Amino acid sequence: MSENKKKVHIISLGCPKNLVDSEIMYGTLKNTGYDLVTEKEQADTIIVNTCGFIEEAKEESINTVLEAAKLKSGKLQKLVVAGCLTQRYKDDLVDGLPEADLFVGSGQFQNIDDILEKAYQGDTQKTYFNLPTYLQEESTPRLNSQFSHRAYLKISEGCKKRCAFCAIPLIRGNLQSRKIEHIVSEAKLLVASGVKELIVISHDFTDYGWDLKKKDSNRTDSPYNLLKALSEESGAQWIRVLYLYPDGIDEEMVQLIKNSSNLVSYFDMPLQHINNSMLKSMNRRMTKEEILACLGTIRKEIPNAVIRTQFIVGYPGETAEQFDELVDFIKEQKFDRVGAFQYSTEENTKAATLPNQVSEDIKQLRYEKLMSVQQVISKEKHNKLVDKTLPVIIDGVSDETELLLQGRYEGQAPDIDGVIYINEGKAKQGDIVQVKITESHNYDLVGTII
């Protein structure tokens, strides 16, 4: 590296999978002598790790780059645009963002130290796209950016499904799974560093290992075997899995979660719709009847399981009757957590070519109605928790005020669900304590340590 040690600041946008990529860049740069700074104004180099999933995320990415570019009048020397948006739009983005110095695709971020070093030595190359995706290895450096007691554990890259509305396979490619032994090895290292909660992430957990077994029929990598190995070998106290598609949740997996004390009974299942015509048009390859059977299995075996899902409103061709069917389904199922997206037209996806596109006004109205229905359900669910005592992991001092602690019970994933504000009792960050719930709100709870 050049004699003057460079200060780097990374802005990570989008999903936790993108955050892990940022953590790999952090680890790589730290290992090669760069200073990592928390304030962007102090940085010689700013890296914006972008998201390119939906229109709103793309706009946020572009605006963040333009905001960072203003610092070029001061200390900032190199502005790097990395991640999904860069990979997806390549040369178009280079032409549209002359403010940026380097463009690094989703298959090149692991080489960020070499890329920066060459740039600081005068190399004029601006674009690095020659690999479609990168699958981390056992030796890949990574610096956990979460609270020290929790970490994301990425088990695969890409996706084998081809949902009609989704551009992820165009950006991240086909499914590439890490081997179980490598994942467990990383999990052990994270736990040894103080992590108590592992959050398993991928684009689709329930397809994990399919590609490995296709290449080698002797491999035994599967969602069940991975969960079992993590439960028995990692040493983590809480293991939470995100992005379980209902077509891969079977009774064997549900029984494993039910009978393993450190596998959190939290099912994050993006259903997207419930009307069979909509599901077929979305290329979801599941029917309403199969989804209901899956939900029935979970609730029969684990009555207290927390189920989180998400839906798309205003998908091309969605009629008022089909939307009403979705709303009725939400009322009947009473999900613990629901997120919703207004359909976003993504170029080069099948859904973008479909007739009967829904107007923006109707999308907004449907979104508001769906979320208002869920708000009532969420409040009812939270009211039932009042006076109950729950194990809670302490994330630290509250974001709202230094007078309160903030934590989560097993039914709350970080950053996407609500929190528990603790107004009585003492605990350290990372402690798992018993908390009696004293108040409930639409998305958050209040309690005291007992």
Image: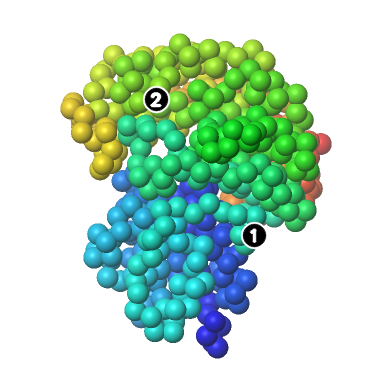
Query: Of residues 58 and 201, which is closer to you in this image?
Result: 201
Expressed as whole percent of the image width and height from the top left, the position of residue 118 reads 44, 79
Q: Amino acid at mark 1?
A: Ser
* Dot label at residue 356: none
Identify the element where label 1 is drawn: loop
**Residue at the outermost left position:** 355
Choose the circle earlier in sequence order: 1 or 2: 1
**Total residue callouts:** 2
Please state, as top left, top right, bottom left or bottom right, where the C terminus lies in the image. Answer: top right
Give the residue number, with chain letter if any, for mark 1. 139
> Compared to 293, does 342 lie above or below?
below
> Compared to 168, does 40 lie above or below?
below
Q: Is residue 366 left or right of residue 44?
A: left
Q: Amino acid at mark 2?
A: Arg
Q: Is residue 255 visible?
A: yes
Q: Could you tell me if the residues under marks 1 and 2 are in contact, i.e. CB atoms within 8 Å?
A: no
Expressed as whole percent of the image width and height from the top left, the position of residue 343 reads 31, 34
Q: CA distance from mark 1 to mark 2?
A: 36 Å
Mark 1 packing: few (<14 Cα in 10 Å), some, or many (20+)?
few
Q: Which image quarter: residue 393?
A: top right
Mark 2 packing: few (<14 Cα in 10 Å), some, or many (20+)?
many
Please state, as top left, top right, bottom left or bottom right, where the N terminus lies in the image. Answer: bottom right
Expressed as whole percent of the image width and height from the top left, the position of residue 212 reads 56, 39
> Compared to 359, does 405 lie above or below?
below
Residue under the image location 45 percent in, 11 percent down: 289
Give the residue number, with chain letter if any, for mark 2. 284
Identify the element where label 2 is drawn: loop
